[in-house]
Image (tube, rainbow, N blue to C red):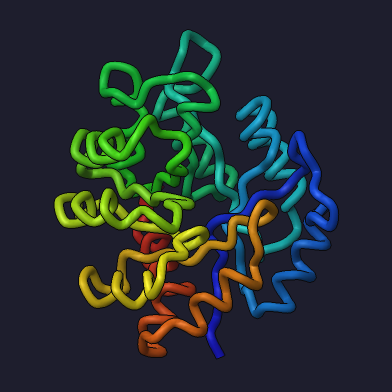
């Protein structure tokens, strides 16, 4: 049986609550049980849509008491006294057991260029903290390439790349060894099989995209892919376990 770790999971209520959507951590844990998901990297809706600092605080509060949630904070570069420095972010993450982060440059209107985000991203890269970012938070594919090449020490995980992404994504993968791909919405024909053939299974990270997407669909896509059981287990849990084990806070 495949053991899953869901690396793309959101808790808390967003601005639009779909019918049947997961509403609390108890319901999410029940769903995880149904699909043999051992743990989930979770970020908070408030950190996405309103206030990163408040959302991070709520995430710790709402997931406290369950070792099945691996809290993932939203981080922004320092601006005056509004947001911490890179060193301060890392110290707070260590204190709260946070070992991965997300960035939302489009949502919060900040640059990822070195003049703006270099201090933060260099600090995250030095400690080998994985940085998750969704494609819709970047201007275009060129911006993803520039991000990976500007910060070669940072391990970036691209979330929700889309089903028609290969023509843009493959050249970046071939030139940027620090880029990993999360599997929710990576739904091209035989996409996982061909990715493993040309790039290996070690750069794929399983994620569901809950609550916008379906855990059942994400798990089925992986389980039914024409790849080996060893590759399936690497994608389902092994790769993210390896990345997190190498974090040095």
Q: Is residue 41 above or below residue 80?
A: below
Query: Which of 139/177 is in front?
Result: 139
Query: Which of 33/93 is in front?
Result: 33
Q: Is residue 95 above or below residue 166?
A: above
Query: Which of 31/82 is in front?
Result: 31
Q: Residue at 29% across / 25% down in the picture? A: 118
Q: Residue at 84% across / 57% down in the picture? A: 20
Residue 50: image quadrant is: top right
Quadrant of the rendering where the N terminus is positioned: bottom right
Q: Residue at 24% across / 40% down in the picture? A: 145
Q: Position of residue 207 (x, y in %)?
A: 53, 62
Side of 212 relative to 94 (left or right): right
Residue 67: image quadrant is: bottom right
Q: Position of residue 175 (x, y in %)?
A: 15, 51
Residue 203: image quadrant is: bottom left
Q: Residue at 42% across / 81% down in the picture? A: 232
Query: Which of 136/2 is in front?
Result: 136
Q: Position of residue 95 (x, y in %)?
A: 56, 42
- Number of numbered discs: 0
Q: Is residue 41 above or below residue 38?
A: above
The residue positioned farthest toward the top in the image shown: 80
């Amino acid at each position: 049986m495949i053991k899953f770790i869901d690396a793309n999971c959101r808790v808390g209520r967003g601005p639009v609550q779909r019918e049947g959507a997961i509403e609390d951590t108890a319901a999410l844990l029940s769903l995880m049980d149904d699909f043999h998901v051992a743990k989930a990297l979770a970020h908070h809706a408030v950190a996405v849509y309103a206030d990163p600092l408040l959302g991070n605080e709520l995430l710790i509060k709402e997931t406290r008491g369950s070792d099945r949630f691996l809290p993932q904070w939203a981080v922004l570069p320092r601006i005056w006294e509004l947001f911490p420095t890179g060193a301060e972010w890392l110290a707070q993450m260590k204190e709260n057991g946070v070992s991965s982060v997300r960035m939302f440059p489009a949502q919060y209107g900040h640059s990822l260029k070195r003049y703006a985000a270099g201090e933060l991203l260099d600090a995250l890269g030095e400690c080998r903290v994985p940085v998750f970012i969704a494609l819709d938070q970047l201007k275009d594919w060129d911006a993803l390439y520039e991000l990976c090449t500007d910060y070669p020490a940072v391990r970036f995980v691209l979330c929700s790349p889309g089903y028609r992404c290969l023509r843009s994504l493959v050249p970046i993968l071939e030139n940027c060894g620090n880029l990993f791909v999360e599997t929710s919405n990576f739904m091209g024909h035989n996409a996982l099989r061909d990715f493993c053939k040309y790039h290996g299974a070690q750069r794929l990270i399983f994620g569901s995209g809950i609550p916008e997407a379906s855990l059942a669909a994400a798990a089925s896509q992986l389980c039914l892919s024409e790849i080996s059981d060893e590759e399936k287990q690497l994608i389902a849990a092994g790769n993210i376990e390896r990345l997190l084990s190498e974090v040095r806070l």
